[in-house]
Amino acid sequence: MSGQLPLGLQLKASARFSNFVAGANRELLEQLQLTAKGAGEPFFACWGNTGSGKTHLLQASCHEAAERGRTVAYLSLNDLPALRPELLEGWERYDLVCLDDVDVLAGDPAWEEALFHLYNRIRERDSCLVVSSVVPPARLNISLPDLVSRLSWGLVYQLQPLNDEQRMQALQLRAQQRGCEMPDETGRYLLRRLPRDMPTLFDMLDELDEASLVAQRKLTVPFVKSVLGL
């Protein structure tokens, strides 16, 4: 990756546009890809429930931009208690800045002001900013009105949840990329027995893949039952 991440922050290698099953989010995905390449809207906000794929998309944006020689910065504001708003100073020098979970900073005047000024500096430099939240920008409990309006200026998309068929497709695609096979029967069994948010399902797949390598077993329903204790 040619773009340098601040603070040694690391992106998940598996967070790519190529393995994101879009479902009803095809337009969102296409527009975000353009922004990551520097050919779309410079300001982009996506929102949706926890586990809907926001972090995957923001990190995939960073991978896409960096592979094209653009400099990138990614930060999850879930780490807010351990961070100071001064961290954002100078981030306008990056071609693409992705800020995950911006709803977390709502109600913190120092962080709200820091993000407001960063937004303005990014706009002056013609860089790009992508943010995510659990509610639309207009409904964030941000006390700085000008920041609310700034976050709503660009493209705003809601992430629609996947249906079971699309969840199955996402699981099988991730399994294939890890070098294993997820039979339909096994996938249906897991969707019946486990929480259906994709982060939980992907974590489970990582565990199963490691166990199958050790045991030299395929991901059959009996093997999955024995590994997960279902």
Image (spheres, helix red, strand yellow):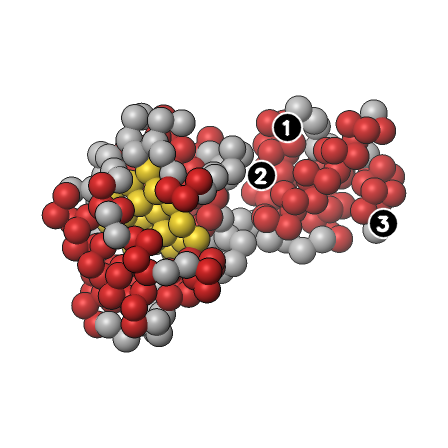
Q: Residue at x 73, y 46 (%)?
A: 190
Rendered location of residue 153, percent (x, y): 20, 57
Mark 2 lies on a secondary structure that is: helix
Residue tagged by mark 1?
178
Query: Label 3 crowding class (10 Å Cα cut-off): few <14, some 14-19, many 20+?
Result: few
Mark 3 lies on a secondary structure that is: loop
First along the sequence among labels 1 and 3? 1
Could you say which is closer to the camera, residue 135 or residue 11? 11
Residue tagged by mark 3?
229
Name the image quarter holding residue 145. bottom left
Q: CA distance from mark 2 to mark 1?
A: 12 Å
Q: Is residue 178 above or below residue 61?
A: above
Horizontal relation, residue 7 to residue 39: left or right = right
Horizontal relation, residue 113 to residue 133: left or right = left
Residue tagged by mark 2?
170
Look at the image and tell me whether residue 104 can be seen. Answer: yes
Q: CA distance from mark 1 to mark 3?
A: 22 Å
Amino acid type at circle 1 is Arg
Q: Do tag 1 and tag 3 residues touch (Cβ < 8 Å)?
A: no
Rendered location of residue 169, percent (x, y): 59, 37
Q: CA distance from mark 3 to mark 2?
A: 23 Å
Q: Residue at x 33, y 38 (%)?
A: 72
